[in-house]
Amino acid sequence: MAIKQPLQRSAREQILNPGLDDFVKLAVQRMHYIVNPSEAEPQPIIFPLAESIRWEFFTKKDWDDFGNLESEHGRLNYTLTRYPERGPPMACEHILHQLLGEQSVLAQWCTFAPALETHAIAALHEVCRQQQDGKSQQQYIAKADYVTLPVDYAVGEHASELSLKLWNRSLEEVASQMAKGCSAYFEQFLQVHAFLKDPIYGFQKPVKSQAKMFERLFRDLEKTMSIASLNTKVVEQLAAQAAQESAFMTSPLLKKVSHVSFLAHHQLTYANVPLDSLARAEFSVPSHVLEVIEEMLLAAASNAGLACPIVPILATTRPAFSKKGEFLTPIIDGNHRATAALLLRFLARQPLLADGVAVERRLLGYCTDHRLGQKWQIDLSDVLKELYTERYGRLRHQLTSQSSLLRRFATVQDIPALVVQEEDFHTICKQRSVGKLRPVLLHPFHQTLFNDDGLPFALPQKAGQTHGRPEVYRLLSLTPFGSAQDVSGHEIFKAKVRESMNGLTKEPNTLVVVKAVD
């Protein structure tokens, strides 16, 4: 089936230390293109909003069926239609029937939302119970104790139909209100949007702050055009886009944003994420982590010890399951890079690397001091044991002989990360997709269950899930590195990027040189 490739975008200067105004401007430009699609070229798209699944693109038939699949309007219609399993739990269906029977779904949303949330949380707890069945261990001390097959909640046969009706009714109502200059139900519209993308945890989105962003987007757009004069269907597309854009702009990870890069068709938003804040869902392969450690040492050496450039990980935020009101920072892609960075920082602080037994004893204290949970402890311990086997004598010698370079890692606090939202992905569950005609998807809530350290769940190494990642990227450094608090955005970073570091098996081993643009 013919694939529709994204249109190429012209080269743009990256934005260093972007602020809210920068993100608003970029979002408004995308909304402007929805109104005027005959412009010279479309705007760069936030990853992964141009991809259908992993790094694959939509087909020409998909575009014919759903319209612009680089817009939130087309993409959400596609998801709700093609993946009914991503719909709300079956227990929510009778409530949705009642809501859709009302004259206005937005006016009545707050009446029905508490019952929907109650059923959604009940479905989540049932999934949790099923995943714990058969786990009789009183202690979880090895990877095998944690590895769990993901379970889904039951979805009714009318899931797609009900979801699409709710979405279309909400769009019609909010577009009608906007044509009259009314903003009374913006929060309710954003809650509906969040619920349809994540039927379990969508209720916990910060819709009050998001609604302010939503309104600002339309105020800024109104400076160049009259919303009231637009076709209703166009206003619906704008409302959908503004919902997605405002949701992204309320991500807590943007508080430490460092760069916005424009590569290929992407807008890539990079932040410095605290290593100690990262949650753990999927275990790593020790030999792979040690390859990445070697590559990080080479990357630091090629930059004279002033920086350690790596391919940024992908990170998101999710509500915690065990501690209400708290949030997790799951690694969407880059488990091995994160493990390598944490272990290098640990090794950089050890007085005598030759004594493997003493080094391993200190690992528990390191994990405790940095509030790294049990899954991190197990993962790091397995890599450390592998490092002290006969096979890795050369790497141990490299670590001890380059002690001054290794010590540069002792100060590292943050890892560069591409900021994404889990609910924007069609995440493949590898464990359940083998032998199936089409991939089986994970729900956004699975990221909460598998990343929460209070639950005994983990995904197996390299066989749990796959999101996809952009095939283009900007090399960014761990920070602070050595005595430098920050690496200048004007530095040229050099690194030998091999498959084990970038994860893109289709990419050859090449020397990547990335220069930040003024």
Image: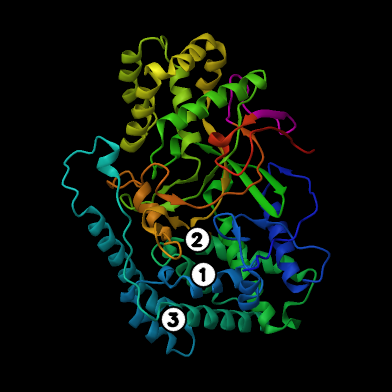
Secondary structure beneath dot 2 equals: loop
Mark 2 or mark 1, earlier in chain: 1
Q: Which mark is residue 162?
A: 3
In the image, residue 310 lies at what x, y percent? 60, 33
Which class describes the residues within 10 Å of circle 1: few (<14), some (14-19), or many (20+)?
many
Q: Quadrant of the C terminus?
A: top right
Residue found at x 71% / y 48%: 263
Q: Which residue is mark 1?
A: 79
Q: CA distance from mark 1 to mark 3?
A: 13 Å
Instruction: Kindly check if marks 2 and 1 are in contact, taking CB atoms under 8 A apart as contact.
Output: yes
| Left or right position of 373 against 270 | left
Q: Which residue is mark 2?
A: 426
Instruction: Kindly check if marks 2 and 3 are in contact, taking CB atoms under 8 A apart as contact.
Output: no
Kind of residue at disc 3: Leu
In the image, residue 497 lies at what x, y percent? 62, 33
Residue found at x 39% / y 79%: 111
Report the magenta residues as a range: 478-495
| Left or right position of 148 against 396 | left
Reply above or below: 239 against 205.
below
In the image, residue 97 lies at what x, y percent? 38, 85
Name the colour scheme. Answer: rainbow
